[in-house]
Amino acid sequence: MTISNVISLLGGLALFLYGMQMMSGGLETAAGDKMKSILEKLTSNRIIGVIVGMLITAVIQSSSATTVMVVGFVNAGMMSLRQAVWIIMGANIGTTITGQLIALDIGAIAPVIAFIGVVMVVFIKNAKANCIGEIIAGLGVLFIGMEMMSTAMLPLRESQSFISLMTTFSNPFFGILAGAVFTAVIQSSSASVGILQALALNGLIGLDGAVYVLFGQNIGTCITAVLASIGTNREAKQTTVIHLTFNIIGTIIFTVICMFTPLTSFISSLTPTNPAAQIANMHTLFNIVTTLLLLPFGTYLASFAEKVLPVKDKEETEDVFESPLPTLSYQIGTSAILVEQIENEIKNIQNMAFKNVNESLSQLVNFDKQKEKDLLRSEDKVNTINLKLSEYITEALGIEQNSENSFKMSVYYHLLIDIERISNYAVRIQKYQEKVTLNSEEKDRIGQLQNLIFMASKDLKDLKKEEEHYGRIKAFCKEIKRRQTKRMKEKSISFELTLFFSQLVNDVERINEHMLAIARDYNMIVVHEA
């Protein structure tokens, strides 16, 4: 095999993988932000969940991409571990469609398929048509790459050392190990199965050796999800345990069957002149049968994963976020995951900010030294999350392909500023307690302010209600100012107390304005979606 053949093989593999990436990108742009609602509606039933996983994977030609998406959804709290089981099972079936298409030998028309897709992307001025065109073009590029790999491997038929290497794969251990390692390296079972089919088409390996490599490839494909789970929460990591367990169980079952029954000979006899179809059929059979066998035990797989990787107590985790934010990528489902998790984190620090305001007003009435320290720590956490989340949103906007989600994240970026300012005012308010001693009437007024802000903080996503709260707080602040002015004229209030109420009212008015700004931001998103 010459250098030219090696370069051609690598080029073909690059096109194959790039074709899958194009298909995944097209689906992500078309429906990535809708994945959340689709999966919420369809994964409650195990059968439908399997079908959904199968269809998504069949479109993007990659079980790894689907599983990575599921890991992200579980990490973001958008999907339960038990819902994820069915999607993973379906993904394993859906990924077999690539091998079946290769077996049909449509490589001859692959350039035509790619051309049709490119025409749709370049000449049709419609976003949805462009996404479909990207999927079709990706499919064509994928098969052009497959043809290049197959052609590059032709000289290997003359290599005795390579043929000798292929015969060692008849040993189940070496075959499974080779398939797992190679697939883990290129992170695509579809590509590794395609290469295996190319070897078979060139007469370099028979089904009796290929089956064990094939089983190993199903284990190796799990490495992508394992890598994607690094930095995620325990529930997301449990998802990868399920994926790995599923394929290991399937491999054990089919290895035993192939060693002690004539299954391999039977599959070969179905398409004796088409070795690529033999591999595709075995791959399909492996995943369908394993899914059918394990479908009744899906909840047990989830329970097993929970025992292997038990969830740690929240206080044991050092991550500043409620759940670790997903790694930014073009993977399918990333849009839905990003938006959902950013929304969750904004809700988290929003609650923290208003809790700080509530505590600071309570401190004016009944000061506690420990609560002062707790408030300062909480404020530091709000600032830290705010900074990290702002940086994350900025990076996310750089890769986001969906205009609706880009708009949402831009609004969230500005919304974070208002939340941080509210929390900052809480710390300022707390400091005022050092200056004065309040009587029961003054404490009662602070309690009323506290209640008004609390009620307003609960309706931030309803602009009409928030405007009503805004008016009430503004009127109450105006009334406090009026009363203070009257008491100053009567000389029944000290200068320190006058200054205290002046500063307090000013800060409350600023908090009131920031709450209204937050409500308007949320309303912008609602209007944009409509």
Image: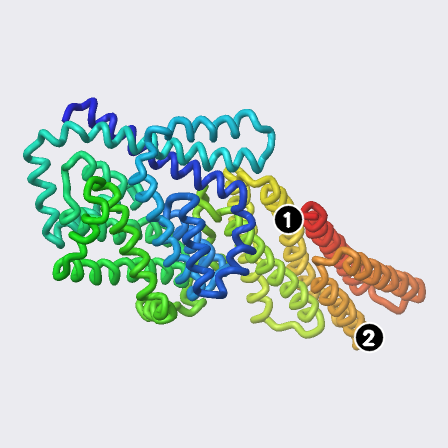
Looking at the image, residue 508 sits to the left or right of residue 209; the answer is right
Q: Considering the image in quadrants, where does the N terminus appear?
A: top left
- Evaluate if marks 1 and 2 touch, with contact meaning CB atoms under 8 Å apart: no
Pick whichever, 89 or 70, lies toward us: 89
Pick whichever, 68 or 250, lies toward us: 250
Question: CA gap, disc 1 to disc 2?
Answer: 34 Å
Q: Is residue 387 visible?
A: no
Q: Is residue 172 visible?
A: yes
**Residue placed at 59% from the left, 67% from the top?**
372
Q: Residue furthest bottom?
A: 440
x, y percent for residue 16: 33, 35
x, y percent for residue 179: 20, 47
Q: For numbered disc 1, what is the local secondary structure?
A: helix
Looking at the image, residue 199 sits to the left or right of residue 464; the answer is left
Count residues near mark 1 (Cα–Cα under 10 Å), then give few for <14, some for 14-19, many for 20+: some
Looking at the image, residue 513 sits to the left or right of residue 272; the answer is right
| Quarter of the rendering containing residue 294 | bottom left
Looking at the image, residue 6 sits to the left or right of residue 421; the answer is left
x, y percent for residue 504: 76, 60
> Can you tell which mark lies on residue 417?
1
Residue ID for mark 2: 441
**Amino acid residing under circle 1:** Ile
Pick whichever, 289 or 329, lies toward us: 289
**Amino acid residing under circle 2:** Glu
x, y percent for residue 528: 69, 45
Tell me the mark number nearer the camera, choosing from 1 and 2: 1
